[in-house]
Amino acid sequence: MTSKIEFQLFAPYNQAAALVGCFSDWQEIPLKKGKDGYFRTQVELEDGTYQYKFRVQSRSWFFEPDQWVDVNDPYATDIDNPTQNCVLRVKGGERIVDTYVWMHDDKPLPPDHELVIYEMHVGDFSGGEDDPYPRGNYKHVTEKLDYLCELGINAIELMPIKEYPGDYSWGYNPRYFFATESSYGSTEGLKHLIDQCHSRGIRVIMDGIYNHSEAESPLTQIDHDYWYHHSPRDPDNNWGPEFNYELYDEKLDTYPARKFIGDVVRFWITEYHIDGTRYDAARQIANYDFMHWIVDEAKKTAGTKPYYNIAEHIPETTSITNVDGPMDGCWHDSFYHSVKEHICGDTFDLERLKDVIDCKRQGFMGATNVVNYLTNHDHPRLMVELAEREIFDQAAFQRIKLGIALLTTAVGIPLLWMGEEFADYHPHSIEQSKIDWNLLANDSNRGLLEYCKGLIGLRKNNHALYTENIEFFYEDSEAKVIAYTRWNDQGSRVVVVANFSDNFLAGYTIPNFPENGTWHEWTGDYDLEAGDNQMMIDIGGYEAKVFVWQ
């Protein structure tokens, strides 16, 4: 049985276009242009898998005028890697992506304020074990989900997985916005991974590249200046042709770049059931109208389920998340810089430290407005930073633990970069760089992992850490000690005392302690009494004590 399958290409100002495919022996099938700017044709096809391309008279300035070029469908949901043709699947007389059946859409997922995010690169997260099998696919991430559950995270942020040229990249050079990266596995493999995350109460946030595309992305070839700015607006921060969200087509009453990216975001939410987007290079996008609109589209499409929209706007700005701001949250880059410098001993500036632990001091409004991190894919790992300063072994682990304590108890959403939880030491590289799972055989690395689990567990169980409430009740600039308390209205309280010096402080007294009575020190699992509104503690160099009100 055959069915009529429609092929369409939006190219309103191009003179002519044709379709070629295996179904026509790669001979041209002319496309007819409608008043709406779409070229269309219908082809009788049986159920099956086909390859095709469009041939179009380009309007891009780097070709000869009206030169015919072969381009892939900008809306192709799969690309055959060897031939670089579009792949079309037909089943039951309809276009389909695949036949995956979702199993766990009914599982409850954590709301934004409860998130602990784990950023990963699919190609580098799995592998690095002592065996000969290559890893780096969706299925290998799925195999490690139990490990991530034990760690306690409840959201995974996947570095970009849209189809890019070649087999290894960080993904910030997307060529096809509806197709998944073929080197990571099939579309079913990705859906199975997301479904398995949902079955465990883990949300999946997608890193979306909506500032630019790779230079040979189809829209660049069809009519470059209809979708993109003619040239980079900031040549020092340019990663490819930049979408022009200002360009309005009066004749067709549309913003072409917005229309395309809106279709992309809606597709990923409906087809892949994702639970949030990180918007790369939001500062370069520099268009709050577009961002308001795209966030609104994302939330409408997601319906009743939680959907978290995070901007990467470096340096961060409160305007992107506050009352009139388009985004729910933003990457808190000043947290990274300030905490790293304090952990490494480069500086001591109490006011700067307080500003990043309590983002309200910088003007942010609430706990979901910032995503805090000690490192991410853009920054060297702390182990590398410490080694550069000749801080090794136990001294390095001690400082990383201090960082983890601040990360999990500061106001905001914590984010871990893969391997950070056991101090992977691989230098920052855009070459293939698997995390080294063998490190978990070492007591120190394993100990750090357990420490992380404990503090993530505290964060999820003690709802004082979900709030915006924080008070810095003690500081001693000479000893480099700071203490703050977090609380909620139901009586939960947490106190953090942090020592940013090398000195072991024995019998150190903290005055103004928030409550007299028994407190449980979470990281060492023992009880201490506070009386006369003070507590006496022993605290090591570069150490944090975390007290929980009993």
Image (cartoon, helix red, strand yellow):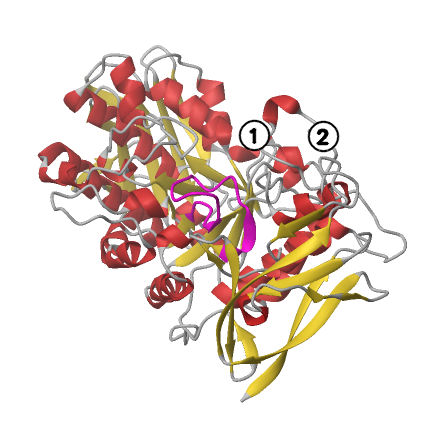
Quadrant assignment, res 40: bottom right
Examine the structure image and report whether residue 166 is included in the region drawn in magenta: yes
- Circle number at residue 488: none
Quadrant assignment, res 323: top right
Above or below, comparing residue 9 to residue 14 in the picture: below
Left or right of 367 in this view: 545: left
Which span of residues is magenta-colored?
A: 158-179
Q: Position of residue 353 (x, y in %)?
A: 45, 23
Image point 56% across, 69% down: which residue?
304
Which amino acid, by three-letter code, is at mark 2?
A: Ser
Above or below, comparing residue 278 to residue 393 in the picture: below
As drawn, which residue projects farthest toward the right? 251
Image point 26% across, 47% down: which residue?
126
The reply to whether the C-beta atoms of the residues labelled 1 and 2 are less than 8 Å apart is no
Above or below, comparing residue 251 to residue 381 in the picture: below
- Which SS class for mark 2? loop
Left or right of 350 in this view: 401: left
Q: Nearer the viewer, residue 210 or 25?
A: 25
Task: State how many labels appear.
Answer: 2
- Which SS class for mark 1? loop
Left or right of 296 in this view: 256: right
**Is residue 186 something one can see in this rendering?**
yes
Image point 83% across, 67% down: which residue?
34
Label 2 CA crowd tier, 10 Å (few <14, some 14–19, many 20+) = few
Examine the structure image and report whether residue 159 is included in the region drawn in magenta: yes
**Is residue 491 something one can see in this rendering?**
no
Q: Which residue is mark 1?
A: 314
Q: Which residue is mark 2?
A: 231
Left or right of 23 in this view: 344: left
Q: Nearer the viewer, mark 1 or mark 2?
A: 2
Q: CA distance from mark 1 to mark 2?
A: 22 Å
Q: Nearer the viewer, residue 10 or 99?
A: 10
